[in-house]
Image (cartoon, rainbow, N blue to C red):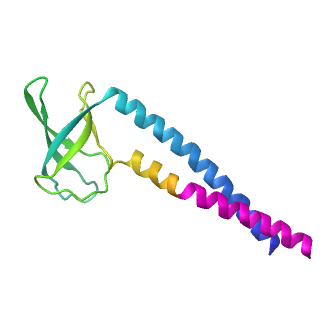
Amino acid sequence: MPYILIIFGIALVIISVLARKNALRKENELRSFISLAKEYEAVVLDTPAEKKKRSAVIQIRIEEQKRTLVHRCTEPFCGEYKRGDRINVYLIEQMPADRSLIKGDNRFEKFISTEKKLRLPARIFGSAAAVIGIILLFLR
């Protein structure tokens, strides 16, 4: 039993450290994307229901150029959007295919926020399990 607690505790700590490294990598990817993109306010025109991939057709008004852009946002998102919803998006127009992320509802920000919520409990419980396992090992 003590060996299982020690192994479980060490595994939890290692998993939390690996998740932190992955979160830092995703945070860097998000920062580099945002540095290339501009933030716009958009209106959802449609959310077609497809079998494999969700998407949202959005309309972006670019005031500097006095034009309107209709764009299909296919980057994974979790929110439920309906026609007329106003959202903020990061958009890169210079790429061959316009690329966008919905601000606050994209895979990068979701992973980073989930990791932040689980980091401390994983390290506390992992350390506690390892310490309890070592204590039980000495008490035998």
Q: Residue 68: where, in percent of width, then height?
A: 9, 33
Would you say 138 lies left or right of 108 here? right
Q: Residue 91: where, in percent of width, then height?
A: 25, 34
Q: State the predominant SS element of the stretch in magenta.
A: helix
Examine the image and state in which quarter residue 38 appears. Answer: top left
Q: Is residue 73 magenta?
A: no
Q: Residue 22: where, in percent of width, then height?
A: 54, 44
Q: Is residue 97 above or below residue 109?
A: above
Would you say 66 lies left or right of 78 here? left
Would you say 11 lies left or right of 96 here? right
**Magenta part of the chain:** 118-140
Q: Residue 104: where, in percent of width, then height?
A: 33, 47
Would you say 22 lies left or right of 111 here? right
Q: Is residue 41 above or below residue 76?
A: above
User: Residue sitting at 26 percent across and 46 percent down?
Assistant: 74
- Which of the image's four quarters has the C terminus? bottom right
User: Residue sitting at 72 percent across and 65 percent down?
Assistant: 128
User: Residue sitting at 42 percent across and 33 percent down?
Assistant: 31
